[in-house]
């Protein structure tokens, strides 16, 4: 199957993103005081654990830390009194324990900073799949703007239509993350939000190209869509083949399917995000549709 290009890759600039965090406090603690919290430490989710934490590599790192010191503090947040949750630096923590180090320098961050830094670290992973990359950026945008993830597509499209009206500075935030194009994030990445858990798993695991999964989102959720997902995987269908099958399934009911999709997209947040001229046009069209349905 022709896999097609993946969405524009994120090249994360941690310096720009972390610059806005609260001033750090660095001090020494025992490795035994640091607890690993999996949801803040995604290493091993995107890199095989055997590669990320191989004992020979950890022992070599531990010896280097014993010889040269720990050059970069671990990042932690406060847990119970006298203990800390690890945010970043799990390899160094494991290496320090193997090497028998009694203290480690740590940098204390707030819970909000912890969430932001965990997302930044996750987005810096090599070979990050497009699903986790997309949802990671959306979570970071949501955290920094206060917008819910399902409100981001409309806000991104509004910023793309009218760059002068971007109250949440989405374009600047994406640029600071290293995202190559506001247009790519406005036009393509929102498709991931419409995918079912099965489709997301298929893309995440490399069983289905993301563009093929995006074709499936044109169908309403249900048996037809699930069956087509299974067929696409089993028969190694191309994106074009899946697109044709979607159109066949829509068939004579294409108008009804399109109507349902359009109605699901008409949300107050999207309408209020329009420019005054486009909002006036939308109001005229809604009035015409209402008159048509009542006639």
Image (cartoon, rainbow, N blue to C red):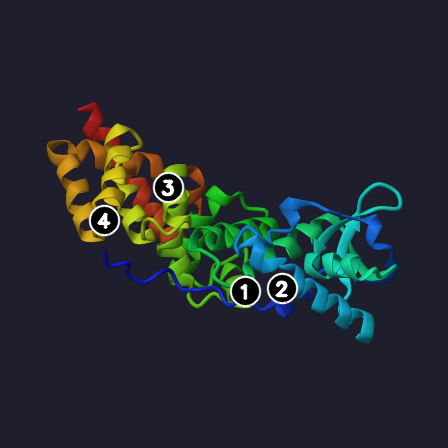
The residue that mark 1 highlights is 177
Toward which corner of the image does residue 221 lie, by quadrant?
top left
Q: What separation in Å lies between label 3 and label 4 (alpha carbons)? A: 19 Å
Q: CA distance from mark 1 to mark 4?
A: 34 Å
Q: Whole-percent x and y of residue 46?
A: 52, 54
> Residue beneath label 2, please?
17
Q: Earlier in the sequence, mark 2 or mark 3?
A: 2
Q: Viewer-proximal residue, 67 or 196?
A: 67
The answer to whether mark 1 and mark 4 are in CB contact below 8 A is no
Circle 4 SS class: loop
Which of the labelled discs sits on residue 236, or is there none?
Answer: 4
Q: Cβ–Cβ below 8 Å for labels 1 and 3? A: no
Position of 145 compared to 29: left or right? Answer: left
Instruction: Answer whether labels 2 and 1 touch (C-beta < 8 Å).
Output: yes
| Residue highlighted by disc 3 | 195
Answer left or right for 37 relative to 27: left
Q: For the N terminus, which image quadrant?
A: bottom left
Q: Nearer the viewer, mark 2 or mark 3?
A: 3
Say if 4 sits above or below 81 in the image: below
Say which residue appears at 55% left-offset and 50% top-offset. 45
Q: Say whether disc 1 or disc 3 marks the residue closer to the N-terminus.
A: 1
Q: Position of residue 2 (x, y in %)?
A: 24, 59
Tell me what residue is drawn at x 26 percent, y 46 percent: 215
Asked which secondary structure carries label 3, the reply is: loop
Sequence-first tag of 2 and 1: 2
Q: Which of the marked residues, 3 or 4, is nearer the chain's N terminus?
A: 3
Quote the CA–CA distance across marks 2 and 3: 28 Å
In the visual, does 281 lie left or right of 155? Answer: left
Residue 196 visible to an observer of this rendering: no
Tell me the CA gap for discs 1 and 3. 24 Å
Q: CA distance from mark 2 to mark 1?
A: 7 Å
Q: CA distance from mark 4 to mark 2?
A: 40 Å
């Amino acid at each position: 199957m022709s896999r097609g290009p993946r969405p524009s890759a994120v090249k994360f600039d941690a310096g720009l993103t972390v610059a806005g965090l609260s001033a750090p406090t660095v001090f020494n603690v025992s490795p035994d005081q640091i607890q690993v919290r999996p949801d803040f430490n995604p290493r091993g989710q995107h890199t095989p654990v055997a590669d990320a934490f191989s004992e020979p590599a950890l022992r070599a790192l531990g010896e280097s830390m014993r010889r040269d010191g720990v050059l970069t503090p671990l990042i932690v947040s406060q847990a119970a009194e006298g203990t800390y949750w690890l945010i970043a630096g799990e390899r160094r923590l494991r290496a320090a324990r193997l090497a028998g180090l009694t203290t480690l320098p740590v940098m204390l961050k707030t819970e909000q900073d912890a969430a932001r830094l965990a997302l930044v670290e996750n987005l810096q992973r090599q070979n990050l799949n497009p699903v986790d990359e997309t949802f990671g950026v959306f979570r970071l945008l949501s955290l920094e703007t206060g917008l819910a993830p399902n409100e981001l597509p409309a806000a991104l499209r509004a910023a793309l239509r009218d760059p002068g009206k971007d109250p949440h500075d989405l374009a600047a935030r994406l640029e600071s993350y290293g995202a190559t194009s506001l247009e790519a994030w406005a036009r393509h990445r929102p498709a991931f939000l419409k995918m079912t858990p099965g489709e997301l798993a298929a893309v995440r695991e490399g069983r289905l190209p993301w563009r093929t999964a995006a074709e499936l989102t044109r169908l309403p959720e249900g048996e037809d869509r699930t069956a087509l997902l299974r067929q696409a995987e089993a028969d190694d269908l191309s994106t074009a083949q899946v697109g044709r099958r979607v159109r066949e399934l829509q068939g004579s009911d294409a108008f009804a399917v399109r109507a349902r999709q359009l109605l699901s997209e008409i949300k107050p947040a999207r309408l209020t995000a329009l420019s005054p001229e486009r909002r006036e046009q939308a109001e005229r069209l809604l009035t015409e549709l209402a008159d048509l349905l009542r006639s």
